[in-house]
Amino acid sequence: MDDNTNFSLVSLKFFDKNLEAEFKQDYLVRSLKLRRYTLVVAIFMYAVFILLDLAIIPEMQASCLWLRFGLVCPAILFALLITHTKYDFRSRDAVNLVTESICSFGTIFLIAHASSPGNHIYYGGLLLCVLFYYILVPDWIISNISSWLTFGTFICIAVFYTDIPWLFLFGNTFIFFFFNLTCMFGCYVIERSERIEFLQRCIIERQNEELQQALAHAEDEKFKAESLARLDPLTDLANRRHFFTLADRELARRDRHPHPLSLLMIDVDHFKQFNDRYGHQAGDLVLKGVAKTIRQAIRRSDTACRYGGEEFAVLLPETEAVAALQLAQRLLASIEGTIVAHGEKLLGVTASLGVATLNHDEKIDTTTLLDRADQALYEAKEFGRNQLRVWSRTPGNKVAGTLIYPPGVVG
């Protein structure tokens, strides 16, 4: 984008009014210290030049004192005080224009009333004023108005109210004109650079904001993708792969700090009949209902997953056999009490459960623990379903028939 298309090449104002207001506010804040320093220096210089008055025009001592300390210095001080108030932004241009006009008037007054060669010396002071307007307070429009008004006033006063020889007047006018022209160009370049820099900062800030939004969106998408990679999309439980990751991590922690660990395997009874008789939508509703029941029954520290098809697994860290059995019985009863609404039909659900528990001194991997719970689950399904079985081992270290715990209270 071409920077020159955003503001007028003559007035340097942005075509966008909101952007122009933002620039002025930004420039006011960034240039505030410079403006204050400039005003302090101006007061000091105008006050110090009283020494020049006393040396060159001692007969005008009273007028010079009144001019410097009764008019110009108080005007500059008033402008300095305004910069410390809330009215500075709205009144800045008017205050600058009035203050600069008073400074110019004071110097031109001395040129008009001082005799030669004193008036030639004050001509240098007038150029110094203009230099201040253009360089230290680089406001393109206000600086030009003040400087060219100063130039015009000087010409009128010099022609009609002074005895400056025409040759000197022509030379002073010539120098003053091109001095103004040079300073005007310098002020133009400074403000144009300020505006281009501000515009580039706005573009960078907007691009940075867009980048931040894009990064935030990417993070959201990454989180969603990671969630999809971890969760089963139908039940919102952990998927099988994520479950294995968490289970392996828990077994590794258990190896470092031995503690009991239990695992439940759950299988929905006669699930194929739901799909065959009522359709796959009904089967999905059954799986969602069972998953909801499991989530409500387990602790925050437990991990439930959809292991595959109609099978679920629940990892129970720091849970001994008795506590695991109590949870399994409550879960079995809760699933049996689950009613799934499909259209006008209410579908009842039951499930079979297998339980496996590791003691403190056992060290096995995740697959072995799952196999134990799956063996117990197989026994529960073989012996009538809607019941739970617990994996156990005989003294001869052979897998024995699992114990039966119906949905009553564990004794």
Image: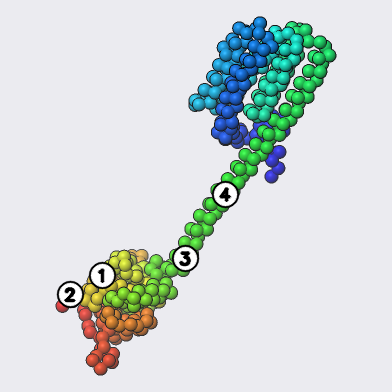
- Viewer-closest of 276 and 170: 170
Check the image and report above or below for 99 versus 246: above
Q: Earlier in the sequence, mark 4 or mark 3?
A: 4
Q: Are marks 2 and 4 in contact (CB under 8 Å)?
A: no
Count neighbours of disc 3 (C-alpha within 10 A) and say few if under 14, some if 14 to 19, many if 20 or more. few
**Left or right of 394 on screen, residue 69:** right
Q: Amino acid at mark 2?
A: Val
Q: How many marks?
A: 4
Q: In whole angstroms, how far apart are the C-alphas of marks 1 and 2?
A: 14 Å
Q: Looking at the image, which residue sits at the far bottom? A: 396
Q: In whole angstroms, how far apart are the C-alphas of marks 2 and 4?
A: 62 Å
Q: Amino acid at mark 1?
A: Ser
- Viewer-closest of 392 and 125: 125
Which quadrant, please, contains the C terminus?
bottom left
Where residue 232 sits in the image (x, y, percent)?
42, 69
Which circle, 4 or 1, is nearer the viewer?
Answer: 4
Q: Residue at x 48, y 58 (%)?
A: 220
Q: Residue at x 57, y 12 (%)?
A: 70
Check the image and report above or below for 370 versus 82: below
- Viewer-closest of 301 and 333: 301
Where residue 186 sits in the image (x, y, percent)?
72, 31
Residue position for label 3: 226
The image quarter in which residue 96 lies: top right
Q: Are marks 1 and 2 in contact (CB under 8 Å)?
A: no
Mark carried by residue 334: 1
Residue position for label 2: 409
Q: Earlier in the sequence, mark 4 or mark 1?
A: 4
Residue 376 in view: yes
Q: Secondary structure at mark 3?
A: helix
Count neighbours of disc 4 (C-alpha within 10 A) and say few if under 14, some if 14 to 19, many if 20 or more. few
In this picture the colour scheme is rainbow
Which circle, 1 or 2, is nearer the viewer?
Answer: 2
